[in-house]
Image: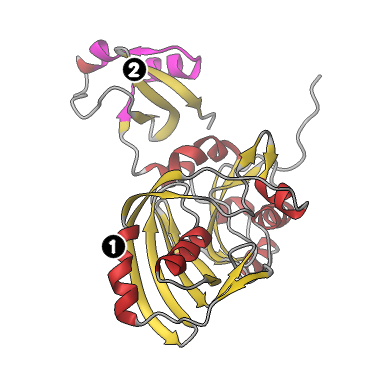
Amino acid sequence: MGRRKKGFPLHGWLIIDKPVGMTSAGVVNTARYVLKAAKVGHGGTLDPMATGVLPLAFGEATKAISYVFDGVKEYRFTVRWGESRDTDDAEGIVTETSEYRPKEEDVLSVLPRFIGKIDQVPPAYSAVKIKGRRAYDLARNKQKFKLKARLVHISEFELLAILDRDHASFRVVSGKGVYMRALARDLALALGTRGHIAQLRRLSVGPFGEKDSISLDKLVELGHTAPADKLIRPVETALDDIPALTLIEEEARRLRCGQPLSVLKLAERVPLNFLSQGDIVVAMAGGKPVALACVEDGVIRPVRVLNL
């Protein structure tokens, strides 16, 4: 007989406003302990120095993380001009300095270069793998390596304020895989100076924003008084941006068993003109998500069955 998992089988989402100085994994461990949950994951890692929106997925919601949080994220950060650091943030060691400080008009003239699809080299202290090892492990061990540029997308990059001679604040809306530390580094270089992130806050990720979040302290407080399932949002809460397909029970049963559904047969019952090859859909039955499924080769195949 297999060993039972410790904890309660909670399913859904909890949005934490991550405090500064804590790892994303630390937040997950705290939530797991407070709510006595069997399975918890997080959507979109935040650096220890960063604060803001960190969605936690419980139970079956963990199966949807990559589909929900690969989308749009919004950040606010402060750049400190005049210093490069090995981590590209305030926690690193100063590696280069510059006396030049950019003027507001210079910053505004350069920002358009970073909007749209751009090539970005991740920070040396990042989780990118090089021959099976994390870049941050290599960097900590002073090993030499080179990271390749990756194509990423930034839809908005806005100067919020010149705070003083050494600092300016920005707002960014980006897609998957954009490093704010690298963005600050490259912006400073484009302006003829050096720079790193002094403060970073994530304002939203996927469908969740600051208004949806609670502090970790509040979670600990509520965890002692409120039932765990009262704090968790339903799994379907995060799936609103994914097209939904309503099934009858027999169709849902087939998907749960890993069997594909014919698009032609489904089209006899429901309009499917909104679907294209390769689309991901949320299959629903009885008001509950049954599976995340993919449209391919004339059928709808389950890619993640949700046992709710």
Residue 300 sits above or below residue 96 on the image: above
Residue 36 seen in this snapshot: no
Residue 45's spot in the image, x, y percent? 58, 52
> What's the CA distance linking mark 2 and mark 1?
38 Å
102 vs 256, nearest the viewer: 102
Q: Quadrant of the N terminus?
A: top right
What secondary structure is found at the residue carrying circle 2?
Answer: strand
Amino acid under label 2?
Glu
Q: Name the disc covering residue 296, or none.
A: 2
Residue 143's spot in the image, x, y percent? 74, 48
Pick out the residue farthest to the bottom.
164
Residue 76 sits above or below residue 129 on the image: below
Q: Name which quarter of the figure residue 111 lies in.
A: bottom left
Q: Is residue 246 magenta?
A: yes
Q: Name which quarter of the figure residue 170 lies in.
A: bottom left
Q: Is residue 75 magenta?
A: no
Q: Is residue 262 left or right of residue 204?
A: left
Residue at (62% x, 43% y) in the render: 10
Q: Judge the density around disc 1: few (<14), some (14-19), many (≥20) Cα neighbours within 10 Å.
A: few
Residue at (62% x, 53% y) in the render: 124
Which residues are the magenta region? Answer: 245-266
Where does label 1 land, which residue?
112
What secondary structure is found at the residue carrying circle 1?
Answer: helix
Residue 200's spot in the image, x, y percent? 52, 68
Amino acid under label 1?
Pro
